[in-house]
Amino acid sequence: MEHYERLEKIGEGASGVVYKARDSRTGATVAVKRLRGGGFGDHDGSRLSEDLLREAACLEACRGHPSVVELRAAHRDGAGGAFLVMEYVGPSVAQVMRERGRPFPEADARRLMRQLLDGARAMHDLGVLHRDLKPDNVLVDAHGDLKICDFGMSRFAAGGAATAPPYTSPVVTLWYRAPELLLGSTEYDARVDTWALGCIMAELLAGAPLLPGRSEMDQLNRAFDTVGADDMTDWPGFSRLPRAGSPLCQRSRPPSRLREMFPSLSAAGFDVLSGLLACRPDRRLTAADALRRPWFTDAESANADQPLNACRFTARVGGVADAIVV
Ligand SMILES: Nc1ncnc2c1ncn2[C@@H]1O[C@H](COP(=O)(O)OP(=O)(O)OP(=O)(O)O)[C@@H](O)[C@H]1O
C-alpha cells in the first residue's frame, strides 16, 4: 500500500471501505477498496483471502469491457488486510439520481441500459454472475458512461462441478432481488441479474425505486402486484423452490400494472422493461436477448443515443465525497 497516497473516503459498504488514492509511481487516480475482516472464518484471514480472490477473479475475467470497472491490482498486506486497486470512475448512479432529482428521458435511459446490458452480457458469457446489481454498484465516469462495480457477491457459475448449483441464497440487495431468489432458489442463473437490471431501468425512467420492499415477503408481494404473478406456479422449477408453499404464491393477482406506471414509454422500451421484469425466469430476457430487441436495434434509436453531457456528472463528484485526514 506504500505506493498509494490515500486522498478521501468515497464509499463504505458491507464488505469494505473505498478510498480515492493516487498511485505515486504513475500519478494515476485510483480507487482502493479495503476488504473488511469479520466473522468466524476470518480468524486466520482465510475467509478474507477467499473473498478477495473471488472478487478479484471475477473482475479480472471481465477486464477490458468498457462497462465494467477495471481492476489494476489486488494485494494482501502484512497486517492481514486485503486491498483491491481499481481505476477511479466517479459517483454511483444512485448518487447521480439522488442529486438529479428527476427521471431520465427515455433516450438517455436507453443509452445507459445498452451499456449495462452489454456489460452484463459479457460477464454472463464468461460465466460470471454479479448477484448484486443496483444503482449503488453502477458508477458514472466523466463522459457520462457507466461501469459496473462491486463484484463482492459475484461468482463463477459456468462449467465444472465445483461451480454448479446449489448457490448461496439470499443474494442481491432486497429491492433488486428476483422472485425466484425471494422464494429461496439455490439453482438460479444469470437472469437474477437481468431482473435487477429491469428494476434499474424502471428507476432510471421513474426517478424512484420500483419495488422498495420492507421485508422479503413484502418484496415478493410488491413484485407480484406490480408485474403480475405470470403463472409463476406453472414454471417447471417452481416446485423445487424452498418457499413454493408460501400462501403468497397461491393468492390470485391482478394483471401487470407496469404499463400504467410507464404510460409515456415507447412500445419498444416497454417491450424491454416488461421482458426484464418477467416474474418467471424462463420468460425473462437474458442480457443478450434484450440487446437484440428493437428498442436497441432500430437504426433510429441507435442514432439517437447521444452521449450524456459529461458536466452533469462530474460537477457532483466533490459534493458526495467525504474528506478524511490521512
Ligand atoms: N472504482 C471506483 N471508482 C469510484 N468510486 C468507487 C469505485 N469503487 C467503489 N466506489 C464507491 O464506493 C462505494 C462502495 O463500493 P463497493 O460497492 O465496491 O463496496 P461494498 O463494501 O461492497 O458496498 P456494499 O456493501 O454497499 O455493496 C460504491 O457505491 C461507489 O460509490
Image: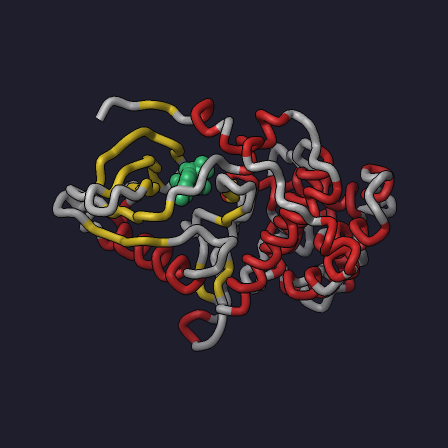
Q: Looking at the image, which residue is at 69% across and 43% down?
A: 109
Q: Position of residue 238 (x, y in %)?
A: 69, 62
Residue at 51% x, 60% y is 129
Q: Is residue 39 left or right of residue 61?
A: left
Q: Position of residue 210 (x, y in %)?
A: 70, 37
Compared across the picture, whether 268 is left or right of 69 comes to right
The residue depicted at 27 percent of the width and 53 percent of the height is 74
User: Is 93 placed above or below 302 here?
Assistant: above
Question: Which residue is painted at 71% across and 60% down in the image?
Answer: 284
Name the side, left or right, on which 235 lies relative to 139: right
Q: Quadrant of residue 290?
A: bottom right
Does residue 286 lie above or below 177 as drawn? below
Q: Nearer the viewer, residue 321 or 16?
A: 321
Q: Taking the image as four quarters, which one is ligand 1 found in? A: top left
- Tell me where residue 101 appears, x and y as whole percent: 65, 25
Specify the quadrant that holds the N terminus: top left
User: Which percent across, then down, holds residue 245?
Assistant: 69, 54
Task: Name the residue nearer the viewer: 151 or 86.
Answer: 86
Asked if one can make out residue 255 in the rendered structure from this viewpoint, the answer is yes
Give the farthest residue toward the left. Answer: 78
- Asked if 193 appears above or below 6 in the picture, the reply is below
According to the image, what is the colour scheme of the structure?
secondary structure
Of residue 243 and residue 315, the one placed in the foreground of this image is 315
Q: Residue furthest bottom?
A: 160
Q: Is residue 279 visible?
A: no
